[in-house]
Amino acid sequence: MKLKIIKTENLDFDYEIYDDKGQVTEMNPALRGVNLTVQKGEFLAILGHNGSGKSTLAKHFNGILTPTRGKVFVNGIDVSDEEKIYEIRQTVGMVFQNPDNQIVAAIVEEDVAFALENLGVPPEEIRERIDEAMKLVDIYKYHKHAPHRLSGGQKQRVAIAGVIAMHPKCIVLDEPTAMLDPKGRKEVMKTIKMLNGKGVTVVLITHYMEEAAQAERVVVMDKGAVIMDGTPKEIFSKVERLKEVGLDVPQVTELAYELKKEGVEIPADVLNEEECVKSLINIFK
Amino acid sequence: MNAIEIKNLSYKYGVGTPFEIKAVDNISLTIHKGEFIGIIGHTGSGKSTLIQHLNGLLKPTSGEILINARNIWLKQVNIRDIRFEVGLVFQYSEHQLFEETVFKDIAFGPKNIGLSEEEIKTRVHRAALAMGVHESWLERSPFDLSGGQKRRVALAGVIAMEPQILVLDEPAAGFDPYGRDMVLKKIKEYHESSGTTILLVSHSMEDIVKYADKVIVMNKGGLFLYEETDKVFSHAGEIVEIGLDVPQITRFARLLKENGIDIGEDIYTVERAKERILELLGKAKK
């Protein structure tokens, strides 16, 4: 049996809009009836355009937000239980879009150690854990450097190391590559896949289709609800549906879709160049 | 007519210090009036340093910059005038918003030019329309808008100055596909309706080839390539070698060719790949 690490039950969330006097004047619904389960060890990508609710959902996974209605469980613990919030945050670590907003210290290794120091972990153990984390994401060579002199991809890996040092079972990354150049994006994706290979559950929020195509499972959100859930092949073969909700598909998937419309017998679920070339070679034979 | 002429431009940061570094190395190129140019290069390739020369934010260590056939660093040229002729929009331009209302923010540039109230009003509305900034936002605080909306307000602020040359550093960075297409389409429409010369810096080759007539590829401070968009991807191999991405469809076409099916070297859109494959299949079926 597969173990669940995150489970949401009929999750609704409303952002409250206040007037000058601090009275709630409006409720802005951001999530509607989300039922989603994340399995232990899984690599899940969440896709959706801006305003689809994907970041709001992610913030429920470690109790930054708590449900307006419904329930969210992390490792069986209800995130609305304020007394368990530290346990929840140690189970699920978060990495955000802008690396500059997440880095607090003036030296890389101090930044990675920040959370552990706050938890009161003994110094010897901190040393061990941060060294291990920095080596894992390949930034150990910069451990004495100033974070602001690193590239975007390196800074984002410093942020990931800080989370890894907490030994979380799950990492949620909210568009971690959106502000990076192609090289930084590749570094971060490689790091994410390596961590998943070591058994860490990964939830990756992204709007890069080529990144989502590398996950085991893809969930698509629109207007605060989960509208599609399946393997990348299942999801990306539904080109029209994705375009309807303002998303792209990988170019080769679109090509296969267009060729199929013209009567070429090509599978609709090609995701990368290699698959597309292979299918075409067969057709040209 | 030439809008921009760069002659043997070199720029060094930290001259005379141990940290001296050459960021732009002997670049010469010409951009004609009304062209839409894409600039691509990885981080540290010198593209930001290059564009900061175009309105005189940086002064060349050596070489010359000519805007509308005038050397901008000659004594008789007022550099302030150049800044009105060449509009430069930085990355994450929404961080530069500061006024109480969207209207005032867009009006800031035109006001500094010293235009009349009436002219300012006309320009604010025209720029707002061009960038898809709703009339209803004009009296609101820019800080109540979403990130994408703020970015368009910031762009409108520069467009309201109606510069002859507009340089945009990653105007769609961090956007989702919908937001990215929307802002780039607005820029393209503005280019077509106004005839403004546009330079668009981007990390995304896909975006650049969709909108630009010509592409500048920078590498290690030098000009690696300056070609018409159609011809750029005949150099796809070299582009990949210097660490830049080419569109997935271009990589696909190259791989297909390696496998004996040649659909041409100028493949960078799905439409073109589709046409060529259908053509080939048509022949194959006969």
Image: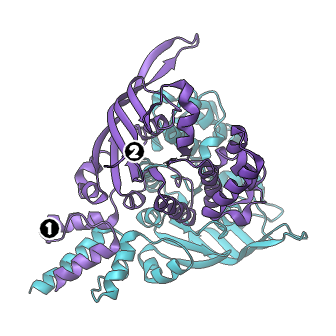
Q: Residue furthest left?
A: B286
> To which quarter of the image does residue B249 belong?
bottom left
Q: Residue furthest bottom?
A: B260
Left or right of B42 on screen, residue B210: left
Give the Cα distance between marks 2 and 1: 29 Å
The picture places residue B176, in percent across and down from the top left corner, at: 44, 49
Per the image, the residue denoted by label 2 is: A49
Are the residues flagged by discs 2 and 1 in contact, CB closer than 8 Å?
A: no
Say which element carries label 2. Answer: loop
The picture places residue B63, in percent across and down from the top left corner, at: 76, 75
Per the image, the residue denoted by label 1 is: A262
Residue beneath the point at 47% across and 64% down: B208
Q: Chain of mark 2?
A: A
**Mark 2 or mark 1, which has the lower sequence index?**
2
Q: Is residue B46 above or below residue A236?
A: below
Is residue B46 visible in the rendered structure shown here?
yes
The quarter of the rendered structure image containing the C terminus of chain B is bottom left
Closer to viewer: mark 2 or mark 1: 2
Q: Colour of chain B?
A: cyan
Crowding at dot 2, Cα within 10 Å, few <14 / some 14-19 / many 20+, comes out as many
Residue beneath the point at 15% across and 64% down: A261
> To which quarter of the image does residue B4 belong?
bottom right
Residue beneath the point at 17% across and 80% down: A283
Q: Colour of chain A?
A: purple
The picture places residue A169, in percent across and down from the top left corner, at: 50, 48
